[in-house]
Image: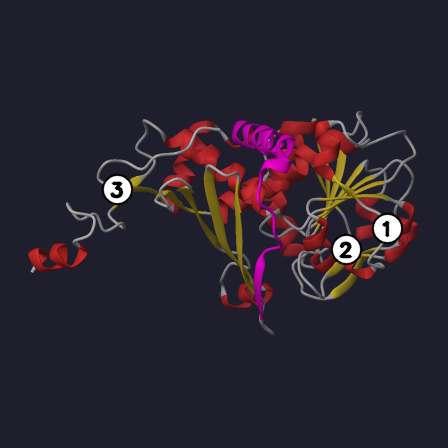
């Protein structure tokens, strides 16, 4: 990948929430989800070229604030993201985020963008990209347990990338399920609200769990998961928060993004430190086998990783070129003489 150079005037493109929504509608949400899945897969294929570290997290009783950095040696990215499950009681989002791309050669930022919407899109695209490798090839029905802010994105990504046509829904809050049913009306999906998680998973080839409460929960019990199922577990994404009974993990082939992070934050935090997992990038590159047979239970224990954000940021930067879906921010001091920063300040007075 070529280095990204800043403009002569050191102006930084900024994609606001409004412009991100305009961009999504311009491209089409299902097209964008497919293209994001492809962009993420391309970067998984060159996984070893990236700097990798577990995200830097600041935990509190209310939630978590995190920084997620990475670089491929030419381009650097980071995302600021929070996770506060109690926010919805105050009319606030559980997750908010913004992100930045910078040129490694100069250190200059070259993109600043909202990432609340973009994170929802890239999380769903990552789930669908993984399911493309791990789910049964004839999968057409998915259960979505937890019908909050992420749920519709997950459903549409699985439809766009994997061909899912039926969604079975369950949430402890019936209003959340009704919201999702309403939002997906006319999208080419059969929507089936269910009265329990056990009812929702019946007959499904893919099960997605995306609940928000920060607790050791058991959304799926062992008896609810039959042979041949692919589980897309995205709700267990911080220490002290899980969704699956540990016996399910013992029966499954477990795939993760970055083990040092997932062992702290994912479903496998329940297991011994040497519990066997497969790094998913190895499946993408052909170094490891994903789905072997029709009876195998596959589990994508996804907590979100910085390389996925990198992929989404570079995708957005490419997609806004030549459009009006951004504004230029004057956020880099740029004196005529690089050593005379003070003189620039004096002349402004």
**Circles 2 and 3: CB atoms closer than 8 Å:** no
**Circles 2 and 1: CB atoms closer than 8 Å:** yes
Judging from the image, what secondary structure is the residue with disc 1 in?
helix
- Location of mark 2 (residue): 267
Judging from the image, what secondary structure is the residue with disc 2 in?
helix
Position of residue 140 measured from the top left corner of the image (x, y, whole percent): 76, 29
Name the residue rendered at 70%, 36% in the picture. Answer: 281
Taking the image as drawn, is residue 189 in sight?
no
Residue situated furthest front in the rendering: 339
Whether 40 is among the magenta residues is yes
Give the quarter of the figure containing the C terminus.
Answer: bottom left
Q: Is residue 223 left or right of residue 108?
A: right
Position of residue 319 measured from the top left corner of the image (x, y, whole percent): 42, 29
Q: Residues within 10 Å of mark 1 (few under 14, many from 20)?
A: many
Q: Residues within 10 Å of mark 2 (few under 14, many from 20)?
A: many
Name the residue rendered at 81%, 46% in the picture. Answer: 277
Q: Earlier in the sequence, mark 2 or mark 1?
A: 1
Name the residue rendered at 59%, 41% in the picture. Answer: 153
Position of residue 117 measured from the top left corner of the image (x, y, whole percent): 49, 46
Whether 149 is among the magenta residues is no
Q: Nearer the viewer, mark 1 or mark 3?
A: 3
**Circles 1 and 3: CB atoms closer than 8 Å:** no
Residue 299 lies, with reference to residue 274, above or below; the image says above
Magenta residues, as a range?
Answer: 31-59
Q: Separation of disc 1 and disc 3 at Cα?
A: 50 Å
- Location of mark 3 (residue): 10
Q: Earlier in the sequence, mark 2 or mark 3?
A: 3
Residue 41 figure quarter: top right
Q: Main secondary structure of the magenta part?
A: helix
Residue 249 - label = 1
């Amino acid at each position: 990948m070529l280095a990204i150079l800043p403009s002569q005037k050191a102006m930084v493109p900024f994609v606001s929430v409004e412009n991100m929504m305009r961009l999504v509608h311009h491209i089409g949400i299902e097209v964008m989800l497919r293209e994001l899945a492809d962009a993420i897969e391309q970067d998984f294929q060159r996984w070893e070229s990236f700097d990798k570290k577990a995200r830097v997290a600041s935990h509190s009783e209310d939630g978590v604030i995190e920084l997620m950095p990475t670089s491929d040696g030419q381009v650097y990215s980071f995302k600021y993201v929070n996770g506060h499950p109690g926010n919805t009681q105050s009319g606030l989002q559980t997750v908010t985020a913004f992100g930045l791309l910078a040129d490694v050669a100069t250190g200059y930022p070259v993109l600043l963008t909202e990432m609340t919407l973009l994170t929802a899109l890239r999380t769903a695209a990552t789930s669908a990209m993984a399911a493309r490798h791990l789910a049964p090839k004839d999968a057409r029905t998915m259960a979505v347990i937890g019908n909050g802010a992420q749920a519709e994105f997950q459903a549409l990504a699985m439809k766009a990338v994997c061909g899912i046509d039926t969604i079975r829904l369950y949430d402890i809050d019936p209003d959340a399920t009704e919201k999702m049913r309403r939002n997906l009306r006319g999208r080419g999906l059969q929507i089936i609200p269910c009265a329990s998680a056990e009812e929702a998973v019946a007959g499904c080839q893919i099960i997605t769990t995306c609940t928000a409460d920060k607790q050791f929960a058991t959304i799926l019990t062992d008896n609810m998961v039959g042979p041949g199922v692919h589980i897309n577990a995205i709700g267990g994404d911080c220490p002290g928060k899980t969704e699956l009974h540990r016996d399910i993990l013992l029966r499954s082939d477990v795939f993760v993004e970055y083990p040092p992070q997932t062992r702290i934050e994912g479903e496998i935090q329940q297991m011994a430190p040497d519990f066997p997992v497969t790094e998913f990038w190895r499946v993408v590159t052909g170094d490891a086998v994903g789905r072997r047979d029709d009876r195998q239970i596959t589990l994508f224990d996804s907590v979100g990783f910085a390389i996925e954000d990198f992929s989404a940021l570079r995708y957005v930067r490419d997609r806004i070129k030549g459009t009006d879906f951004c504004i230029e921010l004057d956020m880099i001091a740029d004196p005529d003489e690089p050593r005379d920063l003070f003189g620039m300040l004096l002349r402004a007075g």
